[in-house]
Image (cartoon, helix red, strand yellow):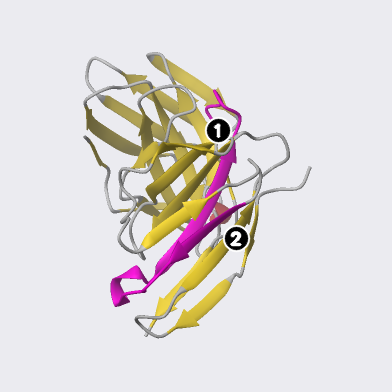
Amino acid sequence: GQSLEQPSEVTAVEGAIVQINCTYQTSGFYGLSWYQQHDGGAPTFLSYNGLDGLEETGRFSSFLSRSDSYGYLLLQELQMKDSASYFCAVSTHAGNMLTFGGGTRLMVKP
Amino acid sequence: EAGVAQSPRYKIIEKRQSVAFWCNPISGHATLYWYQQILGQGPKLLIQFQNNGVVDDSQLPKDRFSAERLKGVDSTLKIQPAKLEDSAVYLCASSQPTGDEQFFGPGTRLTVL
């Protein structure tokens, strides 16, 4: 089976940088994904890491260390609209179902 | 490009009643997923289809839940009979067969009284 751990809540101020960590245990690992979900909305894809290292997409970056079973999502230049829940999710092969973590609720304050 | 469509958006039923949800994936996406998201938790996969075949339904409570994707496009998820603990948002997602990104619909919020 799979299990993922991420902090339940993080608070930061507008313009700051925040890092959301995710550790996982899985019997098979293919990749780590990150999704954003605003209250009442659908999860939307942010990033995917299949290999170790950093992936950068605009203000968001994601990192993976397969040897440590660890990844993180880095959000820079925080904006109020970034207030949402962020989920890490593991997959065991391409196109495979995702197992999601419990989510991290990010609150951005002025 | 149209996104994943789901209906209804909201549904309120009494326990022991039945309910059905409908999903239309993004055109050309062969893989379709149904997730259950209980308030405050991450989505939990119920079933994955590849075209009209089931890839994984290990977490589907088969005594009360059923799903089908007859023509490899639209899908329906049914609960019969519903229990109080089935109150959740039911999300449909689709993807390319080997795609890393899943596209989610707006979900159906089910309340069981």
| Viewer-nearest of discs 1 and 2 | 2
Q: Is residue B39 visible?
A: yes
Q: Is residue B72 left or right of residue B89?
A: right
Quick one: label 1 or label 2, which is nearer the N terminus?
2
Q: Chain of mark 2?
A: B
- Label 2: state its secondary structure: strand
Residue plotted at (22% across, 25% down): A27
Q: Which mark is residue B101?
A: 1
Residue segment shown in magenta: B75-101
Front residue of this view, candidates A72 and A67: A67
Residue A70 inside the magenta-drawn segment: no
> Where is residue A82 drawn, in percent x and y?
53, 51
Residue plotted at (76% across, 47% down): B2
Front residue of this view, candidates A8 and A25: A25
- According to the image, label 2 marks what residue? B22
> Where is residue A102 drawn, in percent x and y?
30, 50
- Position of residue A66 relative to residue B21, above or below, is above
> Where is residue A12 drawn, in percent x and y?
40, 51
Q: Is residue A110 visible?
A: no
Mark 1–mark 2 distance (CA, rounded to whole Å): 21 Å
